[in-house]
Amino acid sequence: MNEQEVAHWLERALADLGLRVQVKAQPLQDSPGDYALVVMLNRPANAALNYEQLTAWFRKAVASRYPQVKRLALYSRPMGQQQADWKTQVRLGPGLATEGTLQPDLSHYCFVLDRQLLTADLPQPSSVVRQAVLGFHGLTSGQKEEVLPLLPTLFRNPSAVSTVTLSVEASLWLEVAGTSEES
């Protein structure tokens, strides 16, 4: 099953809602050749979606176009947010009943810019490293270029990094990241 094709098809079908769609197909272990489809609907923050109607549409549309999909896990979140604020799971096929116990394990996956889910089987970084990375993404491109060559030294030995030649913002970020790592 081509996840990118499914994502583009869904995005075109739901274009009037302004959604960006991410998809991950997971083979079902208990049923070879069948799949569970995980769909993340990224919506504008001000969009008011009728989730009951949307779920009914997904049941019908996915079942008719992709009969090998036997389970759907639908998630929705405002664009730019990490956490889903709505989710439902449904079985496709006889009965089309809502499946309350289907909880796809997304802990080993991450969404990427091309709207695919990739395996990310890595240990969770410390909160200090996560904050440093988030702060790094807040820097401008020029500031990032200043900081990049210093990162290996910063994370091995924060006190060995000199901020004298850096811009104020870049040096502030390095000082905060460096002192956080020492704590």
Image (tube, rainbow, N blue to C red):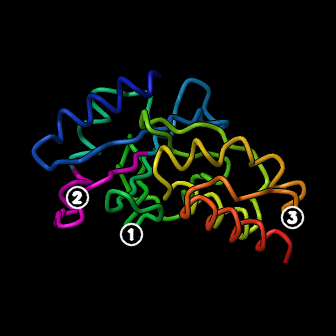
Q: Which mark is residue 76?
A: none
Residue that mark 3 sits on: 159
**Cα–Cα span, label 3 and label 2:** 43 Å
Please give left or right for residue 129 compared with residue 19 in the image: right
50 above or below 35? below
For marks 1 and 2, the one nearer the N-term is 2
Give the secondary structure at mark 3. Answer: helix
Please give left or right for residue 33 compared with residue 82 in the image: right
For marks 3 and 1, the one nearer the N-term is 1
Which is more foreground, mark 1 or mark 2? 2
Residue located 35% across and 59% down the image: 76
Residue located 62% across and 64% down the image: 173
For marks 3 and 2, the one nearer the N-term is 2
**Cα–Cα span, label 3 and label 1:** 42 Å
Residue located 54% across and 57% down the image: 102
Q: Mark 2 is on which residue type?
A: Pro
Task: Please tell me whether residue 107 belongs to the stretch shown in magenta.
Answer: no
Please give left or right for residue 1 compared with residue 128 in the image: left
Q: Hey, which quadrant is residue 70 in on the image?
A: top left
Disc 3 crowd rating (10 Å Cα; few below 14, some 14-19, many 20+) is: few
Give the secondary structure at mark 2. Answer: loop
Instruction: Evaluate if marks 3 and 1 touch, with contact meaning CB atoms under 8 Å apart.
Output: no
Outermost residue toward the left?
A: 16
Q: Position of residue 180 (x, y in %)?
A: 76, 73
Task: Please tell me whether residue 40 belongs to the stretch shown in magenta.
Answer: yes
What segment carries the magenta color?
Answer: 39-56
Which is more foreground, mark 3 or mark 2? 3
Q: Is 128 or 39 nearer to us in this picture?
A: 128
Residue that mark 1 sits on: 85
Which is more foreground, mark 3 or mark 1? 3
